[in-house]
Each structure stands twice: as C-alpha cells, then as structure tokens.
Image (spheres, rainbow, N blue to C red):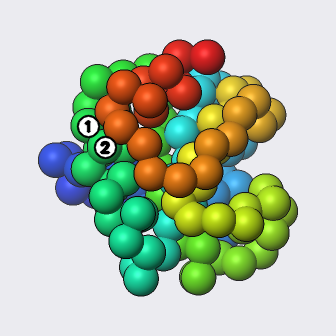
Amino acid sequence: MNTNTENKVTEVNSESFAQIIEQTEGKILIQFHAPWCAPCKMLAPVVEQVAHQYNDIKVIKVNADDSPELAAKFGVRGLPTLLLMKAGELVASQVGAASVGQVQQFVQQ
C-alpha cells in the first residue's frame, strides 16, 4: 500500500481490498483502472483531487489487470469504473472518465 502522504489514493490488491472494506465504516470511493487505459489516466488526477477535498471518504484504486477477480465480483465491464461503497455495501457505480464536478456529485449521493 502507498504510504506517501501527498497521495491520498491508495493502490490496493485483492487481499488489502477486503481488509479496507471491513475496516472502513464510512464511504469508500473505488477506481478500477488499468495502466494501458487512456481514460483511466485522465480520471486519475480528478480522483486524486476529490480525495483531497473529502477527508471523510477513503479513496482506493484497483488495477483490473492485476485483480480480475475483484473486477468480476463487482461486474466491472469497462474502464475506468468508479464504485461507491458505504458500510461495506455497494451504493453506486459509474463507468467512464468524469470531471471533478461529476465525481463530486457521485460521492455526495
């Protein structure tokens, strides 16, 4: 896991994903991405900016190529995909690149 204080978005794998979901009571914003995905690269700084704006939301990234079982579990069919979880339950999902305003609306629902 990334311990860099500048980066509020933590890259996780299958093992650390389950642990984070269990330990986080509030909202979790999850970005499924892949290194080869251009829209994912466009969305990354947007997600990072939103992570800095909302201290009450845990923000994590999952590389869909490295964790295909997680992508399958959540029905991820396109990248990037954003998922919003609260208290361990999936409450919303969104596919594709988005603006800061769109991601802010997504996490506020």
Name the residue located 42 percent from the left edge and 43 percent from the top edge. Answer: 98
Query: Looking at the image, which is closer to me, 32 or 10?
Result: 32
Q: Is residue 96 above or below residue 63?
A: above
Residue 12 visible to an observer of this rendering: no
Name the amino acid, label 1: Gln
Q: In which quarter of the image is the C terminus?
A: top right
Name the amino acid, label 2: Val
Characterize the local packing of mark 1: few (<14), some (14-19) or many (20 or more) Cα atoms within 10 angstroms. Answer: some
Name the residue located 71 percent from the left edge and 78 percent from the top edge. Answer: 68
Residue 108 visible to an observer of this rendering: yes
The residue singled out by tag 1 in the image is: 49
Residue 2 lies left or right of residue 105; in this view the side is left
State the image coordinates of residue 5 (x, y, percent, origin top left): 19, 47
Label drawn at residue 46: 2
Name the residue located 33 percent from the left edge and 65 percent from the top edge. Answer: 41
State the image coordinates of residue 38 (x, y, percent, origin top left): 37, 71
Q: Is residue 83 above or below residue 2?
A: above
Characterize the local packing of mark 2: few (<14), some (14-19) or many (20 or more) Cα atoms within 10 angstroms. Answer: some
Q: Looking at the image, do the residues carrying marks 2 and 1 touch, with CB atoms under 8 Å apart?
A: yes
